Image (cartoon, helix red, strand yellow):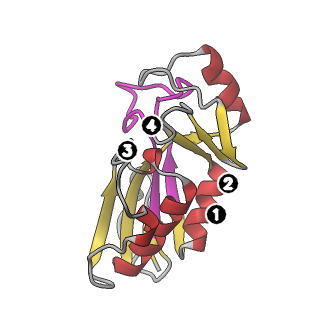
Amino acid sequence: MYNPSGGMLASAIPLPIPDRSIDRIFLWSVFTHLLEPDVRHYLREFKRVMRPGGRILASWFIVDEHILRHIEDHRSPLGDLAFRHKVADSCYINDQSEPLGAVAYTLALVETMITNAGLSLYHLQRGYWSTLWPGEGTGRTGPYDLALKRSLEGGRGGPPIALRAEQG
C-alpha cells in the first residue's frame, strides 16, 4: 500500500526543510498509516525543523484494552476498525493483508515517541472513531484522536487546541 514498489524507506528520508524554519505542522491521517520506526523518524524530523515554540497537530488511532474490547462489538463510523492484530508491544494493525491501511498505538507509546523526539504532549482530544466518545454536534474535532505536541524550548502562546505539541 502507498507505493509498495518504492526503493527507499520513509525513515531514511530527511524532510527537505531547513532547521528551525517552521512553526506549525499539521498531519491528518498520516500517523494512522505509519508503523513505529517511521513515526519516530518523522517526530525527530519535526523537532529539527520546528522553531522554538512550534506546534504540531496530528491525528492518531489511540487504543487501550477497554477500547479494543469495545470496538470488537461496535462498528466505527470510519468502517471496520477493530485492530485485532498486534504487531508490536503497543502497536496494532487493522488488516494483515494491508498493514498500513490503519495503525493504532497505545497512549503510552505515543507519549514515549513524542518525548523521545524532544517534544511534549500538550493536549489530547479523543475522536469519535471508536464510538466511545460522542461525535457530530458535540464539539468533537472529528473522527480521529488528535494529539498536540510542542517543542520543549518555550514559546507557549495561546490556549490548547486538539492535541498540541511544541518544539523545545
Q: Which mark is residue 112?
A: 1
Q: Which mark is residue 29?
A: 3
* Amino acid at circle 1: Thr
- Tag 1 secondary structure: helix
x, y percent for residue 95 = 54, 30
Label 4 vs label 3, nearer the camera = 4
Identify the mark nearer the N-term, 3 or 2: 3
Closest to the observer, 12 or 109: 12
Q: Answer yes or no: do the residues labelled 4 and 3 have beta carbons within 8 Å?
A: no
Q: Is residue 102 above or below residue 53?
A: above
- The image quarter containing residue 150 is bottom left
Q: Answer yes or no: do the residues labelled 1 and 2 have beta carbons within 8 Å?
A: yes
Which of the image's four quarters has the N terminus?
Answer: top left
Q: Which residues are magenta?
A: 122-150
Residue at image position (46%, 44%) is 32
Q: Which mark is residue 108?
A: 2
Identify the mark nearer the N-term, 4 or 3: 3
Q: Which mark is residue 101?
A: 4
Identify the mark nearer the N-term, 1 or 4: 4
Label 3 vs label 2, nearer the camera = 3
Identify the mark nearer the N-term, 4 or 2: 4
Measure how far apart labels 4 and 2 are at the Cα level: 22 Å
